[in-house]
Image (cartoon, grey):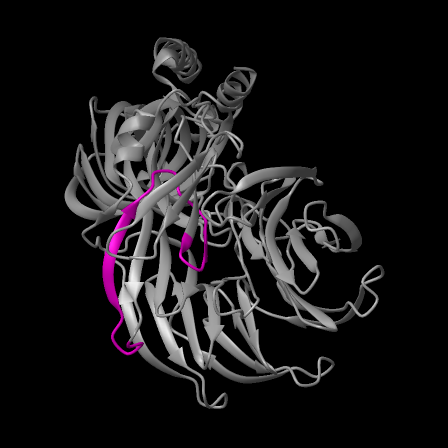
């Protein structure tokens, strides 16, 4: 009986405690993250500041363009590094051109084209030490979108972001989105590759979104192909806009065609009339990222998966484009996480993400052979020209001598200053 | 709440059979406490099991404990336990306090959810009051209620956009999870 009373008393005690402490029962999560606040300037202030500045350390490199002895390397959202590559064993970071919002660039002759958020900036670089802004074509690219519900003041230009670490504590399951700002990749347009080896036209990587062909500058946004007439190079005239399916990523010119990489396939646009590109063919694949290069009979497409790209495919697709209206897959080769690629003769270079730079013998597209893997770097994009490969990697801009394709050797590196 | 009531009523059926004489431990001796528990939190009810092994003398006990805590995410609390009998006799009230570290031990599904994360240990504590019924051979039946916290930390690799399409930059976000629960435990002390 005593025991029963004790149990009753205890049950009452425990139930009382349960009720009394119920308000103390709580699951929380404290999230520490970085928040970015924009720094604005007026358009007039920004435009007045586009000039040769002293060189800045490379921190967040983007796309690059090579013309003659100079490498033009984008500093994401900040501008362009001008690197004197007269001696590839000792490249010299010479100048920095401040262009806020810049992502892409293209160079032809003495003219540099670059995006400044929604505007296209045309710069005379005939004297690299004293550049001159020749024209600003306003509003030709879409407004940038930001995540985290951030809406920019479009009457001004964001020139920088102030980073602040902050901690927010919330009840569990309510911490999914606290407003960190991430740029939206596809909201930007940029300038892309010109594979043509004409002396006066620069060469870009396969990741580019601007390209130069004949007297036209072609740029792609996430869902459009823009055409600029540059018969007067320093006075580009916006001449046409062709709507494309959503998910456009890169553009690559070859002969009379533009090869446009999208998240779901490769589009081929013929430019018999360069002001009015017309779709000539297409090749579909699963939803992934896919830079593309092309030559006479074959196109080489790297498919990579990732957070933005989705999918689970990482491979090289070789596509027969002899019948441009009906491209056919020749063969797929598995890779780790391929990105930019370049081909010189029968030597194919692929930036395979964390697996490094891979060099292939592509003499027989049905039997592409790996010649060399240069590991120890996370590679993004590559340009090859005259036995010299310039590689943008996570930790630096590398240069390799591939005059002997069986023995590609590093000759220099500009390390980033993170 | 229904689960709590069922849990308590179950003791009403098994306790009377165990009631025995209580003897104080005048000499230092090894003692082992093995318990199962019900955790009542803001998001769900769950269970724990634990074993505490240490030394006992008079009204005091001190030992090292380890267990498995299944609340939200599975983990192993490793802790020091100190407890004291408030009364003497075969029916005794006692207070206990545990403090230590909680080591996440995620199951397969939980690991899948945190593929890009690094999970690390956090603090663990538990304190409460209980009732002890001591029988033959100094074996005791324990029933207790307390308030417990477990904490773990997560570093999540986030990727912010780099316009090179391929060039996502990795950022780390850190999370500190704190689970504050009520705990009802039943067990045996040897």
Which residue: 29% across, 36% down? B124
Q: Position of residue A23 (x, y in %)?
A: 37, 11
User: Quick check: B43 left or right of B79?
Assistant: right
User: Quick check: B21 left or right of A257?
Assistant: left
Q: Position of residue A150 (x, y in %)?
A: 43, 23
Q: Nearer the viewer, residue A70 or A34?
A: A70
Q: Is residue B179 above or below residue A1?
A: below
- Count the numbered circles shown: 0
Q: Is residue B148 visible from the viewing direction of this image?
A: no
Q: Is residue A45 visible from the viewing direction of this image?
A: yes
Q: Quadrant of the C terminus of chain B?
A: top left
Which region is colored magenta? Answer: A87-111
Q: Nearer the viewer, residue A358 or A271?
A: A271
Residue reaching furthest front? A232
Is A91 included in the stretch rendered in magenta?
Answer: yes
Which residue: 53% across, 57% down? A207
Q: Quadrant of residue A227?
A: top right
Q: Nearer the viewer, residue A321 or A371?
A: A321
Which residue: 47% across, 75% down? A385
Q: Is residue B50 above or below residue B96?
A: below
Q: Position of residue A317 (x, y in %)?
A: 69, 67
Which residue: 34% across, 30% down? A158
Is A388 included in the stretch rendered in magenta?
Answer: no
Q: Position of residue A249 (x, y in %)?
A: 59, 49
């Amino acid at each position: 009986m005593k025991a029963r009373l004790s149990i009753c008393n205890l049950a009452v005690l425990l139930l009382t405690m349960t009720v009394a402490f119920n308000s103390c029962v709580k699951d929380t999560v404290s999230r520490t993250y970085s928040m970015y606040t924009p720094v604005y300037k007026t358009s007039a202030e920004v435009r007045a500041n586009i000039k040769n500045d002293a060189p800045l350390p490379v921190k967040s490199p983007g796309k690059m363009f090579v013309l003659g002895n100079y490498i033009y390397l984008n500093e994401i959202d900040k501008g362009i590094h001008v690197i004197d590559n007269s001696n590839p064993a000792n490249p010299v970071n010479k100048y920095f051109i401040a262009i806020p919002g810049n992502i892409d660039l293209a160079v032809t002759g003495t003219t540099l084209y670059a995006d400044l958020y929604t505007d296209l900036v045309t710069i005379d670089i005939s004297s690299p030490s004293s550049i001159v802004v020749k024209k600003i074509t306003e509003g030709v690219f879409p407004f940038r979108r930001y995540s985290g519900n951030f809406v920019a003041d479009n009457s001004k230009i964001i020139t920088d972001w102030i980073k602040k670490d902050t901690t927010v504590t919330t009840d569990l399951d309510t911490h999914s989105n606290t407003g960190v700002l991430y740029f939206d990749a596809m909201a930007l347009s940029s300038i892309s590759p010109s594979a043509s080896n004409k002396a006066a036209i620069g060469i870009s990587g396969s990741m580019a979104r601007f390209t130069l062909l004949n007297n036209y500058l072609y740029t792609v946004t996430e869902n459009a192909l823009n055409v600029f007439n540059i018969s007067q190079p320093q006075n580009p005239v916006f001449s046409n806009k062709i709507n494309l399916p959503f998910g456009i990523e890169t553009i690559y010119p070859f002969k009379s065609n533009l090869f446009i990489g999208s998240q779901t396939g490769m589009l081929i646009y013929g430019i018999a009339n360069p002001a009015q590109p017309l779709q000539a063919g297409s090749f579909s694949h699963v939803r992934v990222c896919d830079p593309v290069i092309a030559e006479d009979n074959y196109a080489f497409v790297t498919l990579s998966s990732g957070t933005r790209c989705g999918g689970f495919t990482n491979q090289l697709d070789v596509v027969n484009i002899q019948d441009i209206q009906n491209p056919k897959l020749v063969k797929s080769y598995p890779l780790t996480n391929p990105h930019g690629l370049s081909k010189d003769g029968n030597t194919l270079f692929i930036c395979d993400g964390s697996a490094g730079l891979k060099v292939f013998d592509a003499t027989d597209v049905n039997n592409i052979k790996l010649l060399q893997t240069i590991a120890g770097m996370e590679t993004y994009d590559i340009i090859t020209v005259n036995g010299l490969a310039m590689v943008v990697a996570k930790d630096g801009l590398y240069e390799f001598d591939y005059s002997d394709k069986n023995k590609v050797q590093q000759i220099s590196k500009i390390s980033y200053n993170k | 709440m229904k689960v709590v009531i069922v849990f308590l009523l179950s003791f009403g059926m098994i306790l009377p059979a165990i009631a025995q004489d209580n003897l104080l431990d005048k000499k230092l001796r090894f003692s082992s406490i093995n318990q199962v528990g019900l955790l009542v939190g803001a998001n769900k009810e769950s269970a724990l099991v634990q074993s505490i092994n240490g030394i006992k003398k008079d009204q005091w006990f001190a030992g090292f404990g380890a267990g498995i805590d299944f609340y939200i995410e599975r983990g192993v609390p490793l802790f020091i336990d100190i407890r004291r009998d408030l009364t003497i006799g075969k029916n005794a009230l006692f207070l206990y306090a545990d403090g230590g570290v909680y080591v996440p031990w995620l199951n397969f599904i939980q690991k899948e959810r945190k593929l890009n994360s690094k999970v690390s240990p956090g603090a663990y504590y538990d304190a409460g009051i209980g009732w002890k019924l001591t029988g033959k051979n100094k074996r005791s039946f324990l029933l207790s209620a307390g308030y417990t916290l477990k904490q773990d930390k997560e570093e999540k690799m986030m990727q912010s956009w780099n316009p090179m399409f391929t060039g996502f930059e990795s950022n780390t976000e850190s999370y500190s999870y704190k689970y504050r629960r009520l705990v009802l435990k039943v067990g045996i002390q040897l």
